[in-house]
Image (cartoon, helix red, strand yellow):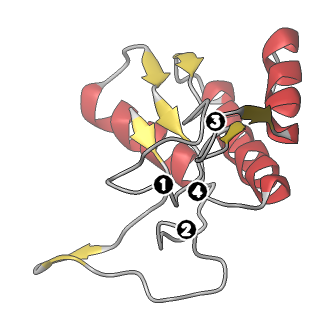
């Protein structure tokens, strides 16, 4: 499953999220808790089967904000595991700042990419998340 934010839906469809200073570059609400909500919903819908989070992250130019978001999202994921939901893996979106939805602006990556030279520069979030992965612990 994949999760980045939460989005209200009413009888007319998706309710646009209002502009807010905490919104991500994508205009999405800053909702690290959405990962836990999505995992629980997935578990409720599909039952007691293993779950892999294939995408989770935040589009931001502030890497400390990326670390804060991901740290909180992983805490919510840990809580689902503590409640007995079988989580088999977590993949951060994305390794590199990529061409996302037709533009270069949404920087989701753990590694910055210079758009002129395509040089790659690891961000502090890469080291931080790598330490969590090596320890195999949230």
Where residue 34 appears, as percent x and y from the top left, is 53, 54
Q: Which residue is mark 3?
A: 77
Q: Quadrant of the C terminus?
A: top right
Mark 4 secondary-structure assignment? loop
Q: Is residue 118 left or right of residue 53?
A: right
| Farthest residue, direction front | 117
Q: Which of the two labelled residues, at mark 4 and mark 1, occupies the earlier sequence position?
A: 4
Q: CA distance from mark 3 to mark 4?
A: 19 Å
Q: Is residue 54 above or below residue 45?
A: above
Q: Which residue is mark 1?
A: 104
Marking on residue 59: 4
Q: Residue at x 55, y 68 (%)?
A: 25
| Farthest residue, direction left | 12
Q: Is residue 135 above or below residue 73?
A: above
Q: CA distance from mark 2 to mark 4?
A: 5 Å
| Marks 3,4: beta carbons within 8 A | no
| Marks 3,1: beta carbons within 8 A | no
Q: CA distance from mark 3 to mark 2?
A: 23 Å
Q: Which of the two labelled residues, at mark 3 and mark 4, occupies the earlier sequence position?
A: 4
């Amino acid at each position: 499953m994949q999760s980045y934010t939460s989005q209200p839906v009413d009888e007319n469809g998706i309710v646009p999220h209002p502009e807010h200073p905490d919104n991500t570059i994508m205009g999405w609400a800053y909702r690290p808790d959405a990962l836990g909500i999505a995992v629980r919903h997935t578990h409720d819908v599909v039952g007691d089967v293993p779950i892999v989070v294939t995408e989770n992250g935040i589009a931001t130019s502030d890497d400390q904000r990326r670390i804060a978001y991901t740290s909180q999202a992983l805490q919510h994921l840990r809580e689902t595991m503590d409640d007995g939901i079988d989580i088999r893996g977590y993949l951060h979106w994305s390794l590199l700042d990529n061409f996302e939805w037709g533009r270069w602006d949404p920087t989701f990556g753990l590694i910055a990419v210079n758009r002129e030279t395509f040089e790659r520069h690891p961000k502090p979030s890469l080291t931080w998340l790598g330490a969590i992965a090596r320890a195999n612990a949230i």
